[in-house]
Image (cartoon, helix red, strand yellow):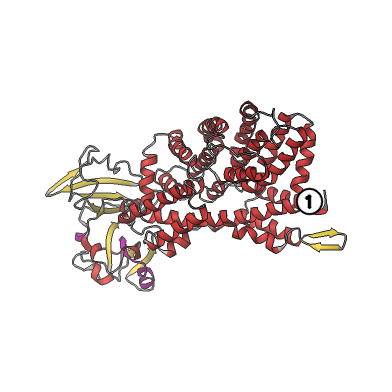
């Protein structure tokens, strides 16, 4: 190997060791490796020069279409979340599973089926917040669910030609560089479906022991404050006519349905079979996170009519916690008598008082110093009241803006249109995602500010940095050198060469992303098939499938990167959970590929 190849190999090895052995942010480590590749001294005939990569080569990944598409898809996800469409999708998909394995199966089955026909990146971007919210409510560690989500999307996408862009890229290379007509729409299913079955079995049987069970130090429902909140079923509510159980109001985490007030009748000890009616008033007791989630249920509104008189648009509203001080002029007066909304332009949604439940209606509660109020108000309320003496403490509640349920059909229609135009190949993913993200903002499904906040910049930085490392492998000759050395070990045995090519594609894709890995190894596979005078197709299938099922590292595949931060994963988690499965898929591929794709006839 030349000096550039040795420098690249040393840098990649250092990056991998740091990713596995330390807890430093992966984007910092990978871009540190890219920086090293730009400034490392390289000896040559003309003396020393700096850099295996030029600046333009190292930074080219920042303009990569795949990275741009992922960033735009985060904006799509923001629109679905802000309209409540995500919560609706999650309720239909997850329901109420009774065990971890049941929850994983409910996630993986529909995800894998949809991924076979639609690009898996927008699918995972859409489902991640849904699953995170579902796990938080049920005090289930989200780290037990997000990697299974990613694996299901990867394995499902590998079953068809259009399921993943890696397959499409490889197919385009085949058509351009060989006399093959390309892969059929369902040709890869001969290998993909058995691999999917193996993947399902692996996740359901081993995740309890191999996946990290990481619950945040302050878990959902640990708040000691118990709020009392009164909700109303307005006229036309979709919950009218449903039982408490059917409406999803039973066994709410951190929340207890105390009573139902119907006309002049109070129904305590509410039965789950009680059918709800319009104008019912439901009194709940629970922690602040639970109250926030209650506000997001379509068909329930706060019982106080004060929120409808606030001088603020719905998108400018949020929930704020405020502790009443003894200097507050309304202490000793009821909320209604003191005209709380008129004084502060804020509606009292719920009240907490020393952990005791308040039996009075919200408007009839007589305020005391030390009461904690949950207010719906303008976003500017916190700044306005922070330095005044009326409240001891004023704190905004994250993620508390009421969903715009009336726009949920618009957000779902935009998502469906995006999936359709990409599946029919009318637009590529970047074009479709750009139009979809723009429509989300233009139709007011989300604000431009919310769209910017939703983008996970760490995911994009890791992805673009990995592309730079892949470019270094290519320009330095490291990839072709390693490939030639490995192929030499197999001699003239096609199955052995197939196994080595699969392993090479798997390893390279794990380090430099699936697309880059497949494009680096396909030329090596073509040369090997020509040397052996056998059909190139089995080798092409092996290289493509190995890249399309990159599961053993976070940087190999976009969906693995997307769940890295939200799942609280570390690099070693992917190796421990995905590594053995990747080896099993390797063995399965070496066994099945010669059965379905013959070596007999040389076609190139």
Q: Nearer the viewer, residue 233 or 551?
A: 551
Residue 308 x, y percent position in the rendering? 24, 63
Instruction: Using the image, determine if residue 226 lies above or below residue 54.
Output: above
Residue, x 25% and y 55% (percent of image)? 301
Q: Is residue 277 magenta?
A: no
User: 325 above or below 250?
Assistant: below
Position of the C terminus, as image quadrant, is: top right
The answer to whether residue 302 shows anywhere in this view is yes
Query: Is 522 in front, or is 50?
Result: 522
- Residue 137 is left or right of residue 214, and the answer is left
Q: Which residue is at the front of the view, 497 or 530?
A: 530
Q: Give coordinates of residue 412: x percent, y percent.
A: 37, 51
- Label 1: how many Cα within 10 Å (few below 14, some 14–19, many 20+): many
Secondary structure at numbered mark 1: helix
The residue at which mark 1 appears reads as: 5
Residue 567 in the image, given as x and y percentages of width and height: 51, 47
Residue 110 found in image quarter = top left
View extreme (left): residue: 264
The magenta-colored residue range is 362-386
In the rendered structure, does residue 378 fall within the stretch colored magenta? yes
Residue 591 percent location from the top left of the image = 64, 27
Residue drawn at (28%, 52%), measured in percent from left and top?
356
Q: Is residue 190 left or right of residue 386?
A: right
Number of labels in the image equals 1
Question: Position of 284 compared to 84: left or right?
Answer: left
Residue 550 appears in the figure: no
> Residue 573 sits in which quadrant?
top right
């Amino acid at each position: 190997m030349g000096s550039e190849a040795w420098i690249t190999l040393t840098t990649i090895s250092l990056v991998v060791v740091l990713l596995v052995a330390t807890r430093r942010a992966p984007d910092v480590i990978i871009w540190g490796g890219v920086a090293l590749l730009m400034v490392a001294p390289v000896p040559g005939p003309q003396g020393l020069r700096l850099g295996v990569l030029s600046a333009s080569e190292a930074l080219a990944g920042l303009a990569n279409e795949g990275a741009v598409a992922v960033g735009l898809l985060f904006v799509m996800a923001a629109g679905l979340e802000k309209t409540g469409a995500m919560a609706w999708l999650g309720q239909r998909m997850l329901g109420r599973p009774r065990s971890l394995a049941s929850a994983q199966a409910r996630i993986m089955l529909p995800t894998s089926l949809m991924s076979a026909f639609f690009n898996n990146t927008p699918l995972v971007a859409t489902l991640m917040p849904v699953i995170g919210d579902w796990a938080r409510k049920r005090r289930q560690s989200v780290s037990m669910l997000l990697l299974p989500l990613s694996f299901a999307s990867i394995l499902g996408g590998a079953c068809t030609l259009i399921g993943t862009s890696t397959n499409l890229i490889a197919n385009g290379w085949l058509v351009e560089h060989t006399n093959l007509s390309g892969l059929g729409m369902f040709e890869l299913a001969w290998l993909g479906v058995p691999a999917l079955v193996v993947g399902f079995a692996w996740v359901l049987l081993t995740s309890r022991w191999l996946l990290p069970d990481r619950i945040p130090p302050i878990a959902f429902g640990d708040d000691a404050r118990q709020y009392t909140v009164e909700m109303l079923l307005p006229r036309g509510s979709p919950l009218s006519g449903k039982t408490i159980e059917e409406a999803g109001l039973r066994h709410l985490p951190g929340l207890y349905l105390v009573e139902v007030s119907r006309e002049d009748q109070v129904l305590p000890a509410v039965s789950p079979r009680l059918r709800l009616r319009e104008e019912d008033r439901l009194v709940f007791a629970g922690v602040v996170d639970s109250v926030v989630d209650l506000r997001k249920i379509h068909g329930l509104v706060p019982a106080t009519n004060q929120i409808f008189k606030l001088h603020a648009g719905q998108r400018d509203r949020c929930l704020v916690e405020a502790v009443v001080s003894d200097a507050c002029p309304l202490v000793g007066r009821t909320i209604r008598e003191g005209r709380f909304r008129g004084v502060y332009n804020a509606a009292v949604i719920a009240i907490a008082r020393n952990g005791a439940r308040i039996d009075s209606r919200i408007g009839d509660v007589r305020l005391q110093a030390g009461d904690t109020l949950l207010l719906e108000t303008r976003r500017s309320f916190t700044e306005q009241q922070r330095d005044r003496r009326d409240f001891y403490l004023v704190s905004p509640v994250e993620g508390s803006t009421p969903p715009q349920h009336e726009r949920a059909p618009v957000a779902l229609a935009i998502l469906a249109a995006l999936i359709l135009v990409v599946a029919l190949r009318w637009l590529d993913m970047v074009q479709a995602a750009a139009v979809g993200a723009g429509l989300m903002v233009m139709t007011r499904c989300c604000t431009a500010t919310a769209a910017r906040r939703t983008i996970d910049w760490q995911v994009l930085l890791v992805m673009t940095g990995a592309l730079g490392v892949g470019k270094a492998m290519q320009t330095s000759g490291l990839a072709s050198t390693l490939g030639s050395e490995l192929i030499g070990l197999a001699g003239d045995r096609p199955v052995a060469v197939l196994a080595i090519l699969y392993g090479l594609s798997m390893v390279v894709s794990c380090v430099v992303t699936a697309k880059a890995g497949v494009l680096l190894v396909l030329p090596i596979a073509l040369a090997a098939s020509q040397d052996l005078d056998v059909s190139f197709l089995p080798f092409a299938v092996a290289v493509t499938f190995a890249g399309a099922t990159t599961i053993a590292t976070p940087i190999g595949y976009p969906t693995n990167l997307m769940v890295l931060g939200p799942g609280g994963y570390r690099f070693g988690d992917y190796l421990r959970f995905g590594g053995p499965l990747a080896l099993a898929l390797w063995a399965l591929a070496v066994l099945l590929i010669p059965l379905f794709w013959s070596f007999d006839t040389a076609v190139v």
